[in-house]
Image: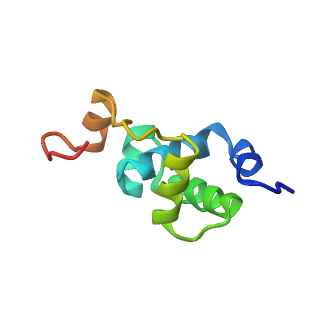
Amino acid sequence: MATNMKDKIAALTPRQLEVVRLVSLGCIVEEIANILDLAVSTVDNHKAAAMRTLGTDKATLLTRLAIKYQISPMDDKLTRAEKRKSGRSGDGWN
């Protein structure tokens, strides 16, 4: 069992890390599903598993952890392809 946060983060799968990063950038589950070409339920499962592993049930704390432990650096933003797939063109966010 992971004892500290770095161990917990190391226990996340690559897909869970992607989902955490996108959550930290303000994406909702439907947008993440579009970006990663997954079913919404699959994204929900990855998000829930990551939150369980990291010991939180709040997306806000998940975002803070992602930034603090550099899953998503402070200056990170959606790529052009991610914006296009998410449907966020021209919304002024990210």
Tell me the colour scheme of the image.
rainbow
Vertical order, 54 against 57 (above or below): above
Vertical order, 62 against 86 (above or below): below
Does residue 51 appear to the left or right of 62 in the view shown?
A: right
Say which residue appears at 17% left-offset and 39% top-offset: 89
Does residue 30 appear to the left or right of 56 in the view shown?
A: left
List x then y, in percent, for residue 30: 37, 54
List x then y, in percent, for residue 61: 51, 63
List x then y, in percent, for residue 47: 56, 57
What residue occupies the far top of the structure in this picture? 80
Say which residue appears at 72% left-offset and 46% top-offset: 6
Viewer-closest of 45 and 39 = 45
Does residue 13 appear to the left or right of 30 in the view shown?
A: right
List x then y, in percent, for residue 70: 54, 40
**Picture quarter containing residue 28?**
bottom left
Say which residue appears at 73% left-offset and 42% top-offset: 10
Viewer-closest of 12 and 69 = 69
Quadrant of the rendering where the C terminus is positioned:
top left
Say which residue appears at 68% left-offset and 47% top-offset: 9
Vertical order, 76 against 23 (above or below): above
